[in-house]
Amino acid sequence: MIKDTSAQDITVAKKNTIKKPLMLAAGVILVGALGFQALFASNDGSISVDAASLQISEVSQKTLTRDVAASGKIVAANAPKVYSPERGFVDLKVKAGDSVEVNEVIATVTSPELTNELKQQQSVLARLEGELQRKQLEARRQKLSLTKALDLAQVELNAADRENRRAKISIEKHLISQIDLEKAVDDLARAKLSYKHAEQEVSLAKDTLAFELKAAERDLARQQLIVDDLLRQVNELTITASVSGIVGNLLVQQKEAVTQSQPLMTLVDLSNFEAELQVPESYANELGLGMQVELTLGARHVTGTLSAISPEVNNREVTTRVRFDNE
């Protein structure tokens, strides 16, 4: 029978492992306390650095400039289009590339409909003028007739009054009867009433004539406005240049039938230019109206202001306009 090795075993006493963490924590606290005391033990403490190891420079605030490489071209700042004012047939007075001045006739439009309408309205105007003159003459004639009637009523009133006074004297002398006196009194009352009615009729007739004349004058004035507006439209058929410069593209042919507001040609103002730049889309969000722009034209450097930004993106580029500071 084989014996085990229990007789050779030695019992080892268990060590206390709690002391090691406690000692480590106490050491950390001690080191922290010593460091805190070293930093804040004195208010006059400072850190000194060798001046030879430092580089001192002046700091100033400036604008950060970013360069954007963009190509462009010089274009006219003002290139208005000319439109047809009415429907008709256009007669061009200039050709592409011709020089023009302000208010120079560059085209005319023949509009048979507008011309015919003007003639008709002018005929109506002439008729209304004739009617007004006729009413004025008729008013004068009626006023004369009314004045005559009023004068006759006045004469009859005077005669009746005179007869009434004579009758009163005669009745006192017993030359006439009481019936004759009463008749004279009635004639006077009738004459007074006739004269009063004649005055009222004259006043009413004058007011009526004045009203009719005023209505005729208003009709004439309204028709005159219609004729004036048609004359304005006919005068606008003669188209003049709005700027001094040259004729750009002709958009219609000679004697071509055109509609109202149809473009006829473009004019180019040579007195004012701008730069049209194609800026990459990646810079579009950083652009803003009023930004200062520096351009290179050959060997010259000019400055300008960003005046327009297109809302559309074509071929990953945004079209902008720059107005030169010094033309």
Image (cartoon, rainbow, N blue to C red):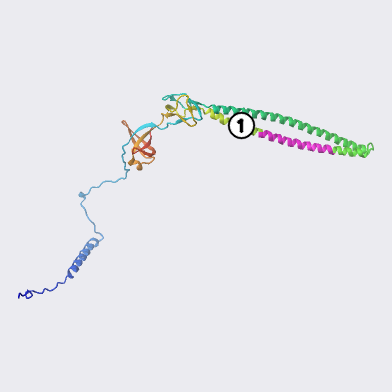
Residue at the (72%, 30%) spot, across then down: 140
Q: Is residue 252 magenta?
A: no
Residue found 79% across the figure and 37% down from its top:
197
Confirm whether the magenta stretch covers residue 201: yes
Q: Classify 207 as above or below 10.
A: above
Percent position of residue 141, x then y: 73, 29
258 or 122: nearer the eye? 258
- Viewer-nearest residue: 152 or 84: 84
In the rendered image, residue 188, in percent from the top left (x then y), is placed at: 85, 37
221 relative position to 290: left or right: right
Residue stretch in magenta = 189-215
Classed neighbour count for the residue bearing mark 1: other residues with Cα under 10 Å, few (<14), some (14–19), many (≥20):
some
Using the rendered view, name the quadrant where residue 298 is placed. Answer: top left
For disc 1, the marked residue is 223
Q: Which of the image's four quarters has the N terminus?
A: bottom left
151 horizontally vs 297: left or right = right
Q: Is residue 132 above or below residue 182?
A: above
Q: Position of residue 227 (x, y in %)?
A: 58, 30
Q: Tell which of 102 and 48 is nearer to you.
A: 102
Of the 4 image quadrants, the one containing the C terminus is: top left
Q: Name the image quarter holding residue 300.
A: top left
Q: Residue at x 88, y 37 (%)?
A: 184
How many numbered tags mark residues here?
Answer: 1
Foreground residue, 273 or 15?
15
Question: Callout 1, which amino acid?
Answer: Gln
